[in-house]
């Protein structure tokens, strides 16, 4: 995308679920961005607290999408991105969870880094509340990157990447229309890994350390921390991705697959309740090998205007 005198039109998409106090912080931080946002689409995933009321009280900047059922992070982002594209004509989408607090310069730094380039997605530096790097959101550097791309990324203060997370991901709207939406059936975990690698396959991405967001998780955990019963989603979704998705090449699947197995071994070794992990592995392996994710038109059916927006975005 070439540089333009017109200011890029950016729409943020925030997925919210039962964290109303953090949502207040997120919306205040988005309203205070140095580069003003065109709109903020807040997807309330059937929260049982007053998250929806918080979004309504935030004013005209916010377009609230209230879902009648919890569709997980994956479904929430698919719904929010579809609504943003369908209603608000963005140049870029800026994706984040409701515990992601961007600094005032975060969006401006992302846009400055991608301006005048063919970069289609960019991610922020993610820190925890104490200022340390958050290991949960470490981007994957692009392997076998050309010298020209590596040098260009460095000149812009960035790093060429193969994947990034939904904790502050800027993605070009026309590429979303081309690559499609996140797969809602992933529900949680690895949805951003699958989606960002799909968007970035054959395209350029950038990690931008000058753009900083605070990920206010309860603890400073890494990807091999004990997930308990949620290990099911880790196993199922990785198997879905490696078996069904076209986001990675065959070689990449072998490399990332081996890395996943090593991480699972570490998770088991550190777990205080291995029976729960064994159950998650058994069910995840069963569903990951015997089933496949449904199209979004099926998994996100019955949501009225949201379902209609998804259909228009994915089938136009």
Image (cartoon, rainbow, N blue to C red):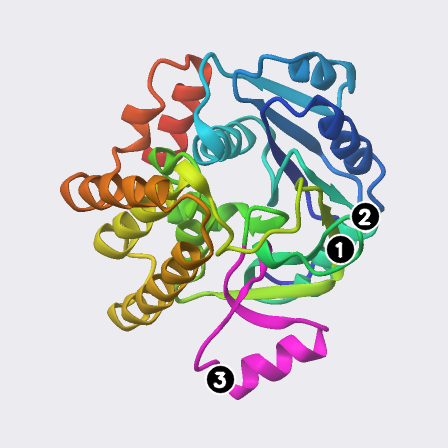
Label 1 crowd (10 A; few <14 / some 14-19 / many >=20): many
Question: In which quadrant of the rendered view does residue 257 lie?
Answer: bottom left
Question: Is 288 inside the magenta-drawn segment?
Answer: no
Residue that sits furthest to the front in the current view:
272
Instruction: Give the x, y percent position of residue 42.
Output: 62, 26
Front position among marks 1 and 3: 1
Q: In this view, does 4 lie above or below 49?
A: below
Mark 3 or mark 2: which comes first in sequence? 2
Numbered range of the magenta stretch? 137-164
Q: Taking 133 as reference, is 121 left or right?
A: left
Q: What element carries label 1?
A: strand
Q: How many labels does the image show?
A: 3
State the CA–CA distance, disc 1 to disc 3. 26 Å
Q: Which of marks 2 and 1 is nearer the N terminus?
A: 2
**Along the horizontal axis of the image, is 308 left or right of 106?**
left
Can residue 12 be seen by looking at this rendering?
A: yes
Q: Is residue 85 above or below residue 104?
A: above
The residue positioned 25% from the left and 33% from the top of the image is 294
Mark 2–mark 1 Cα distance, whole angstroms, equals 6 Å
Q: Is residue 316 visible?
A: no
- Secondary structure under tag 2 reads loop
The numbered dot on residue 103 is 2
User: Which residue is labeled 3 in the image?
Assistant: 146
Q: Which residue is at the front of the view, 100 or 130?
A: 130
């Amino acid at each position: 995308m070439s540089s333009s005198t017109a200011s890029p039109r950016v729409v943020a998409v925030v997925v919210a679920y039962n964290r109303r106090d953090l949502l207040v912080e997120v919306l205040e931080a988005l309203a205070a961005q140095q580069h003003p946002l065109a709109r903020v689409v807040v997807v309330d995933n059937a929260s049982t607290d007053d998250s929806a009321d918080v979004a309504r009280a935030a004013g005209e900047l916010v377009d609230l999408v209230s879902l009648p059922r919890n569709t997980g992070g994956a479904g929430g982002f698919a719904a929010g991105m579809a609504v943003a594209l369908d209603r608000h004509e963005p140049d870029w989408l800026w994706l984040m969870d409701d515990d992601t607090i961007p600094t005032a310069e975060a969006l401006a730094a992302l846009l400055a880094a991608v301006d005048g380039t063919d970069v289609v997605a960019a991610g922020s530096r993610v820190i925890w509340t104490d200022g340390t790097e958050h290991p949960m959101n470490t981007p994957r550097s692009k392997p076998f990157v050309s010298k020209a791309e590596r040098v260009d990324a460095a000149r812009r203060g960035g790093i060429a990447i193969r994947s990034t997370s939904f904790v502050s991901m800027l993605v070009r709207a026309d590429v979303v229309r081309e690559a499609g939406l996140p797969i809602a059936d992933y529900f949680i975990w690895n949805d951003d890994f699958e989606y960002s690698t799909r968007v970035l396959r054959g395209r350029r991405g950038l990690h931008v350390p000058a753009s900083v967001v605070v990920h206010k998780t309860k603890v400073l955990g890494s990807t091999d921390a004990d997930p308990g019963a949620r290990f099911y989603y880790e196993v199922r979704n990785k198997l879905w991705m490696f078996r069904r998705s076209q986001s990675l090449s065959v070689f990449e699947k072998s490399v990332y697959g081996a890395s996943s197995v090593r991480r699972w071994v570490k998770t088991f070794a550190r777990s205080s309740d291995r029976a729960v992990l064994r159950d998650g592995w058994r069910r995840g392996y069963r569903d990951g090998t015997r089933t496949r994710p449904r199209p979004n038109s099926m998994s996100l059916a019955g949501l009225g205007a949201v379902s209609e927006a998804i259909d228009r975005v994915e089938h136009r």
